[in-house]
Image (tube, grey):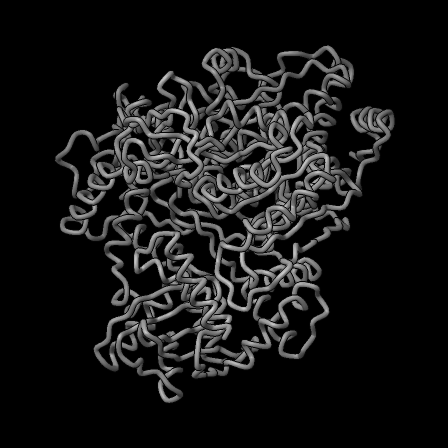
Amino acid sequence: MKLEQTKGYNIIQKWLRAKGFKAFDFQKQAWQYIVNDESGLVNAPTGFGKTFSVFLGSVIQFINDHHETYLTASKNGLQLLWVTPLRALAKDIGRAMEDVINELGMQWKVGIRNGDTDLNERAKQKRQMPEVLIITPESLHLLLAQKEYPLVFRNLNVIAVDEWHELLGSKRGVQVELALSRIVSMRNNVEEIEVSKKKRSSRKLCLWGISATVGNLHEAADVLLSPLKRFINDEGDEKGYFIIKANLDKKTDVLSVIPPEIEKYPWAGHLGIKLAAQIVPIIEQSNTTLIFINTRGMSELWYQTLLNVAPQLAGAIALHHGSIEQELRIWVEEALHTQKLKAVVCTASLDLGVDFRPVDTVIQVGSPKGVSRFLQRAGRSGHRPGDVSRIYFLPTHSLELVEAAALKQAIKQGLIEGREPLTLCFDVLIQYLCTLAIGEGFKAEEIFEEVKSTYCFADINEAEWLEVLHHITNGGDALQNYDEYKKVELEDGLYRMKSRRMAMRHRLHIGTIVSDAMMKVKFMGGGYIGVIEEYFISRLEPGDVFTLAGRNLELVTIKDMTAFVRKSSAKKAIVPSWMGGRMSLTANLGRILRYTFDKIIDNNYDEIELKSLKPLFDLQRELSHIPKANELLMEHFEDGDGYHLLVYPFEGRQVHEAMSSLIAYRISKFRPITFSIAMNDYGFELLSDQPIPVDDTNAYDLFTSDNLMADIQRSVNSVEMASRKFRDIAVIGGLIFQGYPGEQKKARHLQSSASLLFRVFLEHDPDNLLLRQAYQEVFSQQMEELRLRNALERIQQSNIVITVPERYTPLSFPIIVDGLSRYNLSSEKLADRIRRMQVRMEK
């Protein structure tokens, strides 16, 4: 059926014209596919109406099917299931959808279901599903844990997975894959439909992904839409789905904040705060500004600093990050929406979730570490078709200006990172099967076929499947003598979880986000402020002052995983640090960065960022060497601390962490030698008390990929790393119960429980699926083994340049400063020492 000939399309066109809008071609393309019951992926820049490309398609489809009664038809059952990764995003999308529905005069209801949805609303939804349900991956799995859940989906016509690029490559994305495999199968399974004995939609289910910036678009579509392949009509498209790519020119202006004076010996983190006063005019000239900080701890510091340098912003600036209590976060989001706030200092908590909000300007403090993340944040401004996205880049040390130049180049060339999909996540599969066992139960043969239809588990074999079933029914080989691990029973061919206690415990912990134990922070009078990680609070004494949610708080006491505090007027406070705060440079940005150095070598300083760094690079060239894209620079020098070897692969902190340990191990095979190791995103340092035996004769041997896995396992304590990784896997897989709400187990108790299970598996079940997964995740994710291998092979094809500078170089200085923490200096002593080092080097 041609879209233009349908009643639904003409009604939407009339509505758009009345509002002065015009549909984009990519939106009309999506509507046509949805009307034809086709599935696919929509890819378009932020702010060009990706949401309406699927939502209005669903509305058009409904009007076409109910052309006489679409204005009066109510209680139609679930028509559109909208999966979103963020709770904040749900409110914005829901508000926009309700506006459209009301203006069209339709009777559709929009519901939201996530961790914040109260019990009364959930009960109301159970009695009568709204036509549109906006839901998180975790709440979608909770739906599958209900009795008679197939009835929920019997009228479902369209599933939209929003911000798919954010879910892809994560275990939450795997959750979505598994849930889709079940829903797609149900809607195509005649027997299951007949069992429901209720009216059911005669349409074919449409599945649509919605994505912004992602480099591996076709792979992203393959992952999401894989469950459909079992039900492809031979006459349709060979893949069974379509990719709609909006060919729209989204202009992004990148404006760097250039420091008034460029230090030739930069060090990480110190510069940004000094430039705080320079962004005050930017904030004042804009209606609303988002200031993105990479870590929660630094966002607290920046909020206080901005209030100190610009007290006139008090009341007009707010703080937003994941550890601030929900009520305050919601208030900040609403105040941003209504322009009551001029600026919000935020972390990735607002990477998404500000759709339909009038944000004029974005400021990125420090390197975003990736092109995709930078574009995503830039897209928060100019969030309307035709508007220009404006983002300011503020460096935290002068060398980051090279990254700004590289980001500009990458945006110009459209070089966006892909997201690597995960495979064989057995912990998520085990949790999913227990979820199904709570609800209607499941038949092994049927669910095995569905699971195999997902991208993540396409390669699962029958032996692994049987081991998973053995795990949930008997606890596997190692734990079969313990009843608490025998969660699921097989009866008449159906796997069911009969224990109400186990079912309740399982429902409480459905999800794949595992963080360190969080402690609530409350005032002595009872007011709730937010949460903070246990390991941070455990280092404080009563009377110590720290900052959270922009307030200085004095710790009074700790009781039952709650830190009780009172307000403090102290001028100095400890800024909290959260685990996992340091992001690593992506391979994509690292590659562009290496090529950016070629411009510097050719004295091509056309970008303002590179021009401002000319004195720094002149000094680097004078003391040592500036590496080309096809070179690896190594620097040797000696000082009072010992013998330094600096290596610059420009591959990101995470790869350098593994590579530095690997190279240190390989050097130690030449001669017994001990190293201290430091690294940043540009390179790493090996420091020893004796000369380091590396020169032209053996340098290439150090970077060979031969025997890589064996050498990695010898160079790092892979058993200890796997043990820590196993804790998360054990929590997701339900081996460890985290406790009931309000009485969560402490992190050290969880870790000791996980360590005990890890040792049991090592000794009694060394081939255990979850054990193997722990090692696999260490090598593939923590050490980025594939990226490390690629880097070593690149270096083998490069020229290795070894220099012996007389003193620190501009490239080496930030790495050496990063390593000074091994001396356990206080922050003030560290700053004093760095200043003395800088003065000495400038002479």
Name which residue lies at 67% across and 55% down.
256
Name which residue lies at 24% across and 72% down.
674
The image position of residue 321, as x and y in percent, is 50, 35
> Looking at the image, which is closer to me, 44 or 337?
337
Name which residue lies at 42% across and 22% down.
528
Q: Residue 205, can we see it? A: no
* Residue 574 sits above or below residue 70 on the image: below
> Could you tell me which quadrant the N terminus lies in?
top right
> Looking at the image, which is closer to me, 651 or 367?
367
Say how many tags the image has.
0
Q: Residue 554, can we see it? A: yes
Write down the quadrant of residue 520 in the picture.
Answer: top left
The image position of residue 68, as x and y in percent, is 78, 14
Extreme residue in the bottom direction: 697
* Residue 156 sits above or below residue 415 on the image: above
The image position of residue 236, as x and y in percent, is 66, 45
> Looking at the image, which is closer to me, 658 or 77?
658
The image position of residue 65, as x and y in percent, is 72, 22
Name which residue lies at 37% across and 38% down.
514
Write down the quadrant of residue 746 in the picture.
Answer: top left
Left or right, residue 797 beside residue 161: left
